[in-house]
Image (spheres, rainbow, N blue to C red):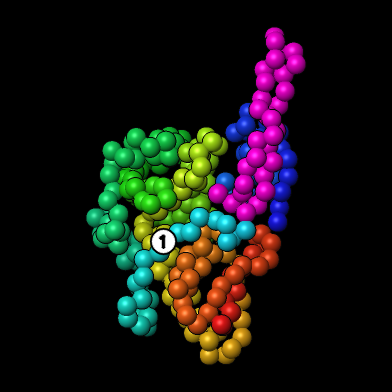
Amino acid sequence: MKSGEFTGSSIDEAVFHGLMELGLSIDEVRIEVLQGETKGLFGLGAKLARVKLTQRLDEELEPITVKDTSKSTEPKAAPKKEHIKEKSWQEAQETHKGYDYSEALAKENPAGVFLEGLLKAMGIEANLKAAEVDDGIRIYIESSTKGLLIGRRGETLDAMQYLASLIVNRNRRQEKFFRVTLDTEGYREKREQTLMRLASRQAAKARATGAPVHLEPMNPYERRVLHASLQNNPYVTTHSEGEEPNRRVVITPK
């Protein structure tokens, strides 16, 4: 478990320094404000803000809700990549029927405002729509970048999501973490479904062999999808082990 004390000219800056140093996202830590910043008189006696960050265990993180799409057996043939890339906003929205997206909400929410400015600074023309969910907001980015906003294994999208979360949750006094989830080209939805199918297969393997199954290292979001997918499975349990960035989910037969 990682932890440490960090300073900055403001509480936000101290937290940011800590997250960068620990290599964690804001929803992966508990934040304790040890000292607020003071400006002093004419610059004399000024003090830096000081905070303590402690890594949360996976079990402490806010659970996510995943949609169960496993009504039938897994199809043999994978979808063609060219169809995924050419999917329009209207077609992509069909895979998000459970979300009531609105352009107005994207323009009102601090995360949407931040992302709009970030995308402009990157020289990317995009249309943002947002939907309220139980634990925060889900923002869908429509653009013609064809994968540029996703990056390798979603790393670019994750980085933008991390920054947006930092902006929204800069008020440390709120009790519950406000989760920001970004999606584009239906990437998150498809990745969640892929992880759910993986969880189902590996749970069956663990049950058949009677031995634990260790999955590949994944980021906290993907681990939570796996935990949530199998939390009601009567035959297996899940837990995470290892240190970031090599922390992984282990599926163990009961």
Amino acid at circle 1: Thr
Quadrant housing the N terminus:
bottom right
Residue 83, quarter of picture: bottom left
**Position above or below: 114 against 62:** above
Q: Position of residue 209 (x, y in %)?
A: 57, 90
Residue 29 visible from this viewpoint = yes
Q: Position of residue 161 (x, y in %)?
A: 48, 47
Q: Residue furthest right?
A: 45
SS at circle 1: loop
Please tell me which residue is depicted at 70% across the width and 9% down the height of the picture: 42
Does 169 appear in magenta?
Answer: no
Quadrant housing the C terminus:
bottom right
Please tell me which residue is depicted at 40% across the width and 64% down the height of the picture: 66
Q: Residue furthest top?
A: 42
Q: What stretch of residues is rendered in magenta?
A: 27-56
**Circle 1 Cα neighbour tier, 10 Å, few/some/many (<14 / 14–19 / ≥20):** few
Q: Which residue is mark 1?
A: 65
Q: Nearer the viewer, residue 232 or 22?
A: 232
Please tell me which residue is depicted at 67% across the width and 44% down the height of the picture: 53
Residue 170 visible from this viewpoint = no
Please tell me which residue is depicted at 59% across the width and 33% down the height of the picture: 12
Q: Position of residue 204 (x, y in %)?
A: 49, 84
- Number of labels in the image equals 1
Left or right: 89 with respect to 24? left
Q: Nearer the viewer, residue 249 or 185?
A: 249
**Position above or below: 109 against 9:** below
Q: Position of residue 197 (x, y in %)?
A: 43, 75
Does 28 appear in magenta?
Answer: yes
